[in-house]
Amino acid sequence: MTTLQLKNIVKRYKSQTVLDDLSLDVADGERLVLFGPSGAGKTVLLRLVAGVIDPDEGRVLIGGEDMTEVDAEHRGVGMAFQNFALFPHMSAFDNIASALTSRKSSKESIAAGVQKVAKLLKIDHVLSHHPKALSNGQKQRTALARALVGSPPLLLLDDPLRNVDAKLRFEMRLELPRLLASEGATVVYVTQDYKEAMALGDRIAVMSQGSIHQIGTPGDIYNAPADIEIARLFGDPTINLLDVVPQRGPDGAFVELSNVRFRLPNFGAEIVGKSCVLGLRPETIAFTEASALGAIPVTVEAETPLNEKTVTLTLTARGREILVSRPAGTPGPVAGPAHIAVNGRAALLFDKESGRLMRPAELTSKRNGEAA
């Protein structure tokens, strides 16, 4: 059983704290994605788990054993570095095979293992080439193949698809989960691409400034982001965010959009009068007829086709921008007056001051009201 436990990890470089009292548990066979902006500390964390660098404080446990003081080569970890780290004097074949060669595997098993993973990653035709003759995408896939070929129980992947072309990246999002599941490895995968995180992770740990701000399933992160910044990071087009102060009505709390009451069925009187930010995912909004119950009048400003979907920019009566996303080919207005319907149960509320996601039990009652 290969689990990974990080306990109160601290890593500093001079006066800068890169990892700040970080703790994390990864289950046996789990695929955990570390997601966050550049500089969040994701790569430093991977290198620390691999044993390339040491923590200033805290412990690293692999399979229940304390590996904090154990050298990298004795940790049983496979890692694909973001910067390739290929041996320039060796062919792609020999670079990939190095993990098996170090175990003194037979020539036949080495050849079979290299061919299998190289074919999957579509680099079997360049195995005889040295790194200088490879494209960046081929170098990245060679580094990934080297990490995979030895079937390590713990696999660390540092944005391994960053330099591959869009078509292969899409294909690998489908193929990698199958491969990793078949290997049974425990995987920690770093990416800055939210779609990749959603596709590859059993869970996602969202990092920022050396700390984990939220961890959960892809559905948890998308549907209940811990704060506004996380909500912005997940979704394309980005989430609509409107400053509101909910009011009290006979059938519950509401806000006004274009002078139309928009109910918030997930919330009660506890949010009334509180300064909030209303979050609406563009795909939870649809164009509707003016006669429909709760139809909200808007003005269509622009429409952008994006292959599989069409994104429309609309304005409320107060000039607030609302993006509406619908599947490509679905009819919709292209300019002028229109009406939208919003799924109130999918609406998110954030505290305006802290930016944190608001839940009914956490709220206190205040007075006042404002139309959106």
Image (tube, grey):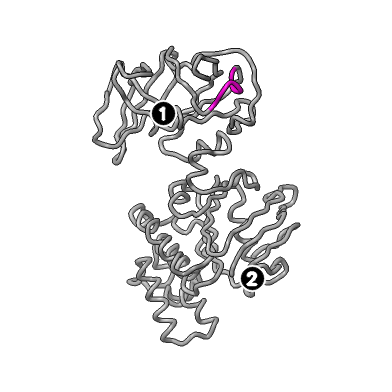
Viewer-proximal residue among 318 and 360: 360
232 shown above or below 50: above
- Seen at 71% across and 55% down, the residue is 9
- Seen at 67% across and 53% down, the residue is 23
- Seen at 42% across and 64% down, the residue is 141
Could you say where residue 160 lies in the image, as x and y percent from the top left? Answer: 47, 59
Q: Earlier in the sequence, mark 2 or mark 1?
A: 2
187 shown above or below 38: below
Could you say where residue 90 lies in the image, as x and y percent from the top left? Answer: 47, 76
Report the quarter where the N terminus lies.
bottom right
Q: Residues within 10 Å of mark 1 (few under 14, many from 20)?
A: some
Q: Which residue is mark 1?
A: 343
Could you say where residue 239 lies in the image, as x and y percent from the top left? Answer: 46, 32
Which amino acid is tagged 1?
Asn
Residue 153 appearing in the image = yes
Q: CA distance from mark 2 to mark 1?
A: 51 Å
Q: Which residue is mark 2?
A: 72
Residues in magenta?
A: 267-272
